[in-house]
Image: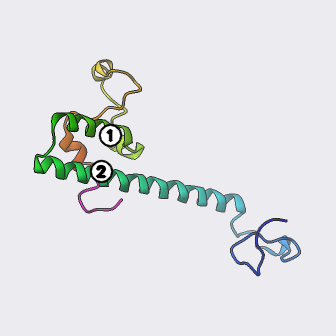
């Protein structure tokens, strides 16, 4: 049997180390535990994505506030922010629920869409400056 034993805590144990019949039925089953671990991993990844994106937004805001950005750099920055936008931010900004007229005007469904108001994107995501997700 692969895994760890009682001599190596935190791992799988075999029937030679513990009789499964002695485990109280009220205890969580492996499937429940595994589902919780998967959910935690997914949320940790989402949090990391939000934190990374917030860092990009903070850097973009600083450049915009200083006014040291060319139109070409601004376009590149918008494209980068749009492409790297986490799903949680898209949902918060309701970018997937565009009115029909806006959707028809969009270049293609594969092109990420940013709100016309960059300030809204950078200031109203619920992740203000200095805040962590």
- In percent of the image, x 78 and y 75: which residue is there? 5
Regarding mark 2 in the picture, which secondary structure is present there?
helix
With 64 as the anchor, is 31 left or right in this view? right
With 113 as the anchor, is 122 left or right in this view? left
**Rendering coords of residue 21 (x, y %):** 85, 71
Distance CA(mark 2)–CA(mark 1): 9 Å
Q: Quadrant of residue 7?
A: bottom right
The number of discs equals 2
Identify residue for label 1.
80
With 3 as the anchor, is 99 left or right in this view? left
Q: Is residue 77 above or below residue 100?
A: below
Q: Are marks 2 and 1 in contact (CB under 8 Å)?
A: yes
Q: Which residues are magenta?
A: 127-133
With 82 as the anchor, is 26 left or right in this view? right
Q: Is residue 102 above or below residue 121?
A: above
Dividing the image into 4 quarters, which one contains the N terminus? bottom right
Q: Quadrant of residue 76?
A: top left
Q: Residue furthest bottom?
A: 7
- In percent of the image, x 19 and y 37: which residue is there? 117
Identify residue for label 2.
56
**Rendering coords of residue 123 (x, y %):** 21, 49
């Amino acid at each position: 049997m692969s895994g760890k034993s009682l001599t190596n805590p935190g791992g799988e144990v075999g029937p030679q180390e513990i009789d499964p019949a002695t485990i109280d039925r009220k205890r969580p089953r492996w499937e429940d535990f595994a589902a919780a671990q998967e959910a935690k991993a997914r949320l940790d990844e989402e949090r990391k994505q939000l934190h990374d994106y917030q860092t990009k937004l903070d850097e973009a805001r600083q450049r915009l506030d200083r006014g040291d950005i060319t139109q070409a750099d601004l376009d590149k920055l918008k494209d980068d922010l749009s492409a790297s936008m986490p799903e949680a931010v898209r949902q918060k900004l309701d970018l997937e629920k565009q009115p029909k007229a806006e959707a028809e005007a969009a270049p293609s469904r594969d092109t990420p869409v940013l709100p016309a108001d960059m300030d809204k994107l950078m200031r109203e995501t619920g992740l203000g400056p200095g805040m962590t997700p």
